[in-house]
């Protein structure tokens, strides 16, 4: 059976033994748990192919600019995976690398980026919904395309919406049930823990199977 949001919610309620419950385990809450389950899986596993997308048109390198906002991206960004500089005019193409040490190291090493001069950035870091480069772009570097590969933020499901994660129905149900058992109180806590462990194993198996088809030199995740 292929599930959509409505049938997911009903199935979770049914498997919790609470069909028709209008006090605690309602279909509305079961739906919230399904959406939460998908988001948590996406957040914890940035390598899932269903979530990968590419934006190669939104950003152009702009002279003297070092900060770029992706809050308006559609679909929304969950994990930044890779960033590529593509200048077809002078045939300059290279990866801009994630900064080792992340945001804390970045702030220590580059306290004031506009004071560093201009050029071709080599490093980037994510700060909330923005990307910062280690240099503002020079005049020569301006006008190029900035490709951003990312794992998308799964949209909230309603009605007859299908999940973004394909072939993941059993895992979504199991993880949603774990939240349901936890909501029922201490008596069900061991069951909730078991359901979480089961769901996490299912998704771990899937991650392993997707990595198996990769070329050995490829890495699906190269950023924060």
Image: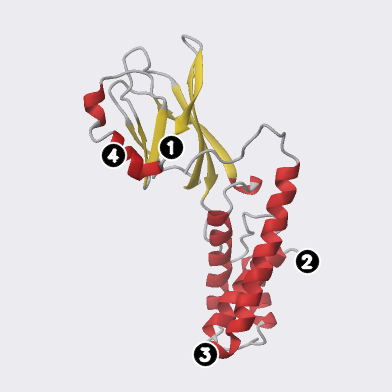
Q: Earlier in the sequence, mark 4 or mark 1?
A: 1
Residue 22 occupies quadrant: bottom right
The residue where tag 1 is placed is: 100
Say what secondary structure mark 2 lies in: loop
List the single residue furthest toward the right: 1
The residue where tag 4 is placed is: 108
Circles 3, 1 touching at the beta carbon (< 8 Å): no
Q: Earlier in the sequence, mark 4 or mark 2?
A: 2
Q: Provide residue 204's location: percent of width, then percent of height.
A: 68, 57
Q: Provide residue 83's location: percent of width, then percent of height.
A: 49, 31
The residue where tag 2 is placed is: 1
Circles 4, 2 touching at the beta carbon (< 8 Å): no
> Marks 1 and 2, how far apart in space?
45 Å
Residue 23's tag is: 3
Circles 4, 1 touching at the beta carbon (< 8 Å): no
Say what secondary structure mark 4 lies in: helix
Q: Provide residue 102's location: percent of width, then percent of height.
A: 40, 42
Q: Is residue 224 above or below residue 54?
A: below
Pick the front one: 161 or 50: 50
Q: Which numbered disc, 3 or 4, marks the residue closer to the eye?
A: 4
> Marks 3 and 2, how far apart in space?
28 Å
């Amino acid at each position: 059976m292929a599930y959509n949001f409505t049938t997911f919610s009903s199935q979770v309620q049914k498997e919790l033994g609470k069909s028709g419950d209008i006090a605690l385990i309602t279909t509305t809450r079961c739906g919230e748990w399904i959406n939460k389950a998908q988001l948590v899986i996406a957040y914890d596993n940035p390598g899932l192919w269903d979530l990968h997308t590419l934006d190669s048109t939104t950003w152009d390198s702009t002279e003297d600019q070092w900060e770029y906002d992706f809050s308006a991206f559609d679909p929304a960004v969950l994990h930044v995976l890779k960033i590529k500089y593509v200048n077809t005019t002078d045939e300059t193409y290279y990866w801009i690398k994630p900064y080792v040490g992340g945001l804390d190291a970045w702030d220590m090493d580059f306290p004031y980026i506009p004071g560093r001069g201009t050029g071709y950035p080599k490093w980037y870091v994510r700060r909330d919904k923005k990307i910062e480069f280690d240099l503002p772009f020079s005049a020569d570097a301006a006008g190029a395309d900035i490709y951003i590969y990312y794992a998308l933020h799964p949209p909230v499901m309603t009605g007859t919406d299908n999940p973004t994660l394909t072939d993941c129905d059993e895992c979504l149900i199991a993880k949603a049930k774990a939240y349901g058992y936890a909501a029922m109180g201490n008596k069900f806590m061991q069951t909730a823990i078991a359901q979480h462990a089961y769901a996490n194993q299912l998704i771990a198996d899937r991650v392993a199977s997707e990595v198996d088809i990769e070329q050995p030199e490829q890495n699906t995740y190269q950023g924060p």
